[in-house]
Image (cartoon, rainbow, N blue to C red):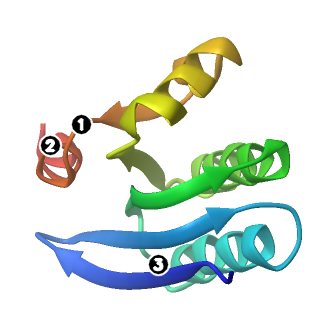
């Protein structure tokens, strides 16, 4: 199942709502390209809404880390929201919780940019 991504602007923040799985192959490539493209367009405030992500594998985690690093390297910020208990646990176990800015809701993630 392909990863569906919907992009919209909320208060000057680009929100990418994702639906599906972030796994090795087409899905993680699509996410990587999406983030790269948004940064290339000059979008500096990005929120990845993971509310409808059903599964993520190690390659998917790697893609998130890579997106975070490439955003940071180009002066952009990447936030995650709506992780749910499964992904929160995975990020805690892998110690990735320490590198990502994670928020419970999309509104909190968007508001975090104006602080």
Q: 44 or 54: nearer the eye? A: 54
Q: Residue at x 50, y 59 (%)?
A: 53
Alpha-carbon span between mark 1 and mark 3: 26 Å
Look at mark 1 in the image and give the residue it sits on: 104
Dot 2 and dot 3 residues touching (CB under 8 Å): no
- Contact check, label 2 and label 1, Cβ < 8 Å: yes
- Location of residue 6 in the rendering, given as x and y in whole percent from the top left corner: 39, 84
Q: Quadrant of residue 98?
A: top right
Question: In the rendered image, which quarter contains the C terminus?
Answer: top left
Number of dots carrying numbers:
3
Q: Is residue 26 left or right of residue 2?
A: right
Provide the residue designation for mark 3.
42
- Marks 2 and 3, how far apart at CA: 22 Å
Residue 19 horizontal/vertical position (percent): 47, 72
Residue placed under numbered mark 2 in the picture: 108
Q: Which mark is residue 43?
A: none
| Residue 47: percent from left, percent from top | 37, 58
Q: Which secondary structure lies at badge 3? A: loop
Quarter of the figure with residue 27: bottom right
Helix, strand or loop status at disc 1? loop
In the image, residue 111 above or below residue 13: above
Q: Closer to the observer: label 2 or label 3? A: 2
């Amino acid at each position: 199942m392909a990863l569906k991504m919907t992009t919209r602007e909320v208060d000057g923040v680009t929100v990418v709502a994702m639906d599906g799985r972030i796994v090795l192959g087409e899905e993680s490539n699509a996410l990587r390209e999406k983030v790269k493209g948004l940064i290339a367009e000059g979008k500096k405030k990005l929120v990845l809404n993971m509310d409808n992500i059903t599964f993520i594998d190690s390659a998917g985690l790697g893609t998130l880390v890579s997106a975070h690093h490439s955003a940071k390297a180009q002066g952009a910020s990447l936030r995650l929201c709506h992780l749910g208990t499964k992904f929160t646990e995975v990020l805690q176990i892998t110690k990735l919780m320490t590198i990502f800015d994670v928020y419970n809701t999309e509104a909190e993630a968007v508001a975090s940019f104006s602080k």
